[in-house]
Amino acid sequence: MDTFEKHPDLPPPVSEVGVIGWLRKNLFSSPSNSVMTIAALYLLYLAIPPVIKWAFIDADWVGNTRAACTSGGACWVFVGARFEQFMFGFYPQAEHWRVLLTWGIFAGLIGLLIAPRIPGKIWIGSFTLFVFPFIAYNLFHGGVFGLPVVTTSQWGGLMLTLILSTVGIVCALPLGILLALGRRSKMPILKSVCVSYIELWRGVPLITVLFMASVMLPLFLPQGVDFNKLLRALVGIALFQGAYVAEVVRGGLQAIPKGQFEAASSLGLSYAKSMVLIVLPQALKMVIPGLVVTFIELFKDTTLVSIISLLDLLGIVQAGLTDPKWLGMTVEGYVFAGLFYWAFCFGISRYSLHLERRFETGHKR
Amino acid sequence: MSDQTNQSLAPSKPRPWKNPRVHGWVAQITLLLGVVLFFAYIFHNTQVNMQAHGISTGFSFLSQPAGFGIIQSLIPYTPASTYGRTFLVGLLNTVMISVLGIFFATIVGLIIGLARLSHNWLIAKLAAIYIETFRNIPLLLQVFFWYFAVVETMPSPRQSLHIGDVIFLNIRGVYLPEPVFGPGSGFILGALILAIIAVIFIKRWAHNRQMRTGQQFHTVWVSLGILILLPLLTFFAVGAPLTWSLPKLQGFNFTGGLAVIPELTALVIALTIYTASSIAEIVRSGILSVSHGQTEAASSLGLKRGHVMRLVVLPQALRVIIPPLTSQYLNLTKNSSLATAIGYPDLVNVFAGTTLNQTGQAVVIIAMTMGVYLSISLLISLFMNWYNHRKRLIER
């Protein structure tokens, strides 16, 4: 009597697994897909080799002057020769260590703040918010402890971009939170003031706000009072960004269930306490990704200050391109600036995705 | 006795200075006073400052001659025209660039968004790279790149790049053939309008009939036929009154044809590419937001693939897509003000730039410029609210 004998499983057909299977499934699953794949490959073939040839193979890397660029590819010598200016603007070279030191401290503080499981974050945070700005200003500007004074008109490049975006977001956050609370309030006058503020700033382009800050602010102040261009731009950016932050925070406030507000008041907490202790911690945690997106937008928008002739990273690259000694370096300059902005924005947005996953603690039902 | 108990049980009325409602009103009135005082203070300072600089405020400057030329205007404009006309020219240019940008950005964004969802790995990855690249580079940098690194490095008019003998591309801009409509063109336009009205009626009739009897009607094909055939027949009936004006090289420059100035080209390309990357993400998230169960349910009802998309997925996806899409359109309109950085004569450039410098009327001019953008965004938010209300999910 034959006994049933199980044959070993046959391996799957070679066309369904491995590289070939993957190719068939993902690139050539249907005639139209095959056509698209081949067209895309052809386009890549047209685009990529010349770019690589231009940027790497034919490029000139070493030298100090334009004469070093002979091979017809990209002239990275231009970027190399002007690198310090792109980073620090017209900040005196002997004082660069002050800028580096300040950003070093800042990076350290931020690192401590975002690292998980470090005790005393509240103290680090307060230090960063309330003490560090004074240290930073004194280091940048000088005039104390025998540091030579460097006026704000000499600040520029990446340094200025970072100052504009960090100061902008730090000033905009409290303003935005207050506006969001005001917009959610039941008091009619308060609410309408906040709503008009938010809608007014969100309805106009940043350029007009910057124009306003640079042209109209001096008119608004009493005669004789004047402050410098950088501060004017900062005021404009903070007021503008506050409205955007307010809308993001409002989204978080709306997502907090009514029970939380009611529970807070039934415990006898005052409005301020219930907001600070119960509602805002939950709301702000929820809107961190949104706030990061606002920050990225702000970071990109700081480029507009070059229109009111502040030399941020893009402004100083643009100014360098008009130097008669380096005419025709436009593509190199823009590619360099573009890579910098891209790396910053992409890095921050990836970090925000990571935060989103870390904070996902069950508000989704 | 019982009276007394009731009285003690009733909540005691708080004293006015301890009543939270009174607190609220006091705070609000203080706020209002503060705002009013703040504006009064600013107003006073402005008046004093303007008097010190010898600037008289008001709208009277709008009727003075401007005295400067504008490289592109949709309405007749000469340096002898008034500042009021300058404002109008700038406004129309802003509107034109926004409309062009919105049109192209929607098309490119839709294509990239759908490509990102493609089952083809290569296409999906390329779309992802496109989105991540252009979303993370400041728009101003992109505008500069297209203007200074691409458009400005085009060859001179004599060495123009060209497609056949009709389209020319050089440093002065893009030259396209321009249609010139002869007498009788009005009839074609009339025919087109008639065709559109007819299509609307046919659609309504077909819908009603389907609701009543269940019979379907080939609305799409019939409509297309009417839309194309009716104007085409009229076109030939009135004797084909259309000629093309071709650009021709004369001396150092081109004459004839439709010239698109390089600033416009660079700006439209940059706005399109930048905004399309955001629109693509919106389209993708909208389509992904429709749960797979909906598609399966539709297929199990026996709907064809096209119908599943058109009747089930798209209407639900649009509810998610339209609100952020309108705010992208709004962003594009506001971003069109970057035109001023490369000298395209939009509202900010000719009005808040040149006119302000010439007249010194900072307050009025900035207020008018902001007012324009503000009205556009308020109009769009009104539309948004109306749309959201119309398309809101009506649940049980």
Image (cartoon, grey):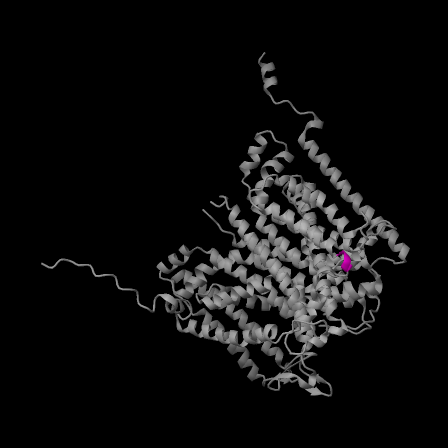
Left or right of B314 in this view: B91: right
Left or right of A4 in this view: A210: right
Name the residue located 70 percent from the left edge and 52 percent from the top edge: A101
Q: Quadrant of residue B306?
A: bottom left
Residue placed furthest toward the top:
B1
Residue A92 counted in the magenta span? yes
Residue B187 x, y percent position in the rendering: 60, 78
Name the residue located 69 percent from the left edge and 79 percent from the top edge: B171
Residue A241 x, y percent position in the rendering: 68, 52
Principal secondary structure, stretch drawn in magenta: helix
Residue B267 counted in the magenta span? no
Residue placed furthest toward the left:
A1
Left or right of A135 in this view: B129: left
Residue B147 x, y percent position in the rendering: 68, 72
Left or right of A143 in this view: B239: left
Q: Quadrant of residue A313?
A: bottom right
Q: Which residues are magenta?
A: A91-95
| Residue B173 against residue A283 in the figure, above or below | below
| Residue A121 against residue B108 in the figure, above or below | above
Along the viewing direction, whichever of A288 and A74 lies nearer the viewer:
A74
Along the viewing direction, whichever of B194 and A174 lies nearer the viewer:
A174
